[in-house]
Amino acid sequence: MNQPRAHRTRIHPAWIVAAVGLIALMAASGFRSAPSMLMIPLEEEFGWSRTGMGLAIGVNILLYGVIAPFAAALMERFGIRIVTTVALVLISLGMFASMFAVTEWQLVLTWGVIVGLGTGSMALVFVGSIVNLWFRKRQGLVSGILSAGQATGQLVFLPLVSNLILVSGWREATFVVAALALLAVPIVYIFLWNSPAERGRLPYGEAGENPPRMTAQQARARRRALASDGPNAAVRALSALKKASKVPSFWALVAGFAICGISTNGLVGAHFIPAAHDHGMSQPVAAALLAAVGVFDVVGTILSGWLTDRVNPRILLAIYYAGRGLSLLALPALLSATPGPPLILFIVFYGLDWVATVPPTMAICREVFGAKDGTIVFGWVFTAHQVGASIAAVLAGVVRDQTGEYTLAWLSAAVLCAVAAAVSLSIKKVKTEPAEPVRQT
């Protein structure tokens, strides 16, 4: 009864922040879809090996994971707006610079290091930061929607990049990806607010009277005070890792998510299009199939978020990993056969499962490590995901160069998925400490 009328009728700003976060993730995902499309043109123009290009992708994926927990701490201390803005600028600069690469080491520097630093600052911990700061209800659903944002970007960019390469060339396609990432910067800077307190609101779903709205000067002063009070971002991230490393559930999450990275980004994301090309499929057709994975991933991840609010997340993870392993087990035979309904069934099944593991993994991190450390701990779990993915990106290229095909890579990933399913069921419901409210930066 004491709330102003406007606050009862207007849309809660948490949903605006979530929408802007979705736009940012879609813009950043442009690079994630580009390398698999660019490998064949670069191979044809420069004669570069799949191993060398896989190394560039692997470095990017590795940094994407290693930077994540530190980015989570930086967002906690200095706000999500500035970290996300800088990340999008780095992605754009790295892509622009890659247009002038003429050696493999330059590709590693641009694709790998510069873009890796940018994408790492906008990893899935970005999703966790938005969810933990802005939402008390619908956390699983929102994490599912935002996680699906990367798949939506893949859906948008894959056909675009494919057609641009055919019509104009790989440099022009790279330019478009870089420009679109840059276009998202002003939207993020204006509308990605750092915390509910800056808008004079409580997080969505939290009962109570709204706090006074902060002025811009007060918000800056608060961030400066938080920056000077307590450990810096690196110490904060390492401290959370030290505490989490004493909990067996953390290592179970690390093992499972490392295998998740091996079986998605590092293998299918980086090498599906080149592998399909090896079997006589044209790049546009292969790109369309991988884009279709993105379509079904949007559905699967949002559904997974909805289920995470209702079902034991450990059971969900076991089902997801087991299903993914079965689909990868069948992939070599499906690629060798004439493209048709069987391969489409793989795309549908695998797509529904692609990022479905994210909402239940985030939920377990919040449950076991509390709201205070949950996002940063998820950052370290996500680091394991990207370490696994980076290793897979390189080794799959080595397998292809040495054997002439990817079959061993697909089958190895299928076996590891069975291991991840078993490990997920072993995670216990134990909290290291009572959950504490997330402080608003």
Image (cartoon, rainbow, N blue to C red):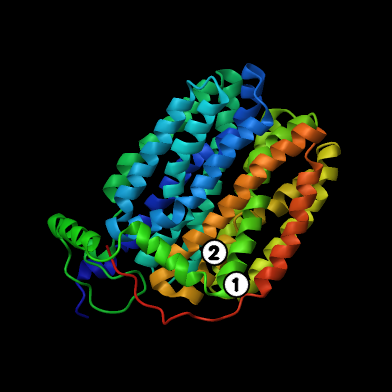
Q: Measured along the vertical axis of the image, is residue 132 above or below residue 177?
A: below
Image location (x, y in percent) of residue 29: 50, 42
Residue for point 29% across, 46% down = 189
What is the distance, in whole Å, between disc 1 and disc 2 at their CAs? 8 Å
For residue 313, the mark is: 1
Q: Badge 2 is on which residue?
A: 359
Quadrant in the picture for the C terminus: bottom left
The residue tagged with tag 2: helix, strand or loop? helix
**At 34% across and 42% down in the image, what residue appears?**
86
**Near-viewer residue (17 or 382):** 382
What element does badge 1 sit on? helix
Vertical placement of residue 436 versus 265, above or below:
below
Q: Amino acid at mark 1?
A: Pro
Give coordinates of residue 27: x percent, y percent: 45, 41
Q: Is residue 219 left or right of residue 437?
A: left
Q: Quadrant of residue 252?
A: bottom right
Please state which amino acid type lies under the numbered disc 2.
Answer: Pro
Give yes or no for contact between labels 1 and 2 (Cβ–Cβ under 8 Å). yes
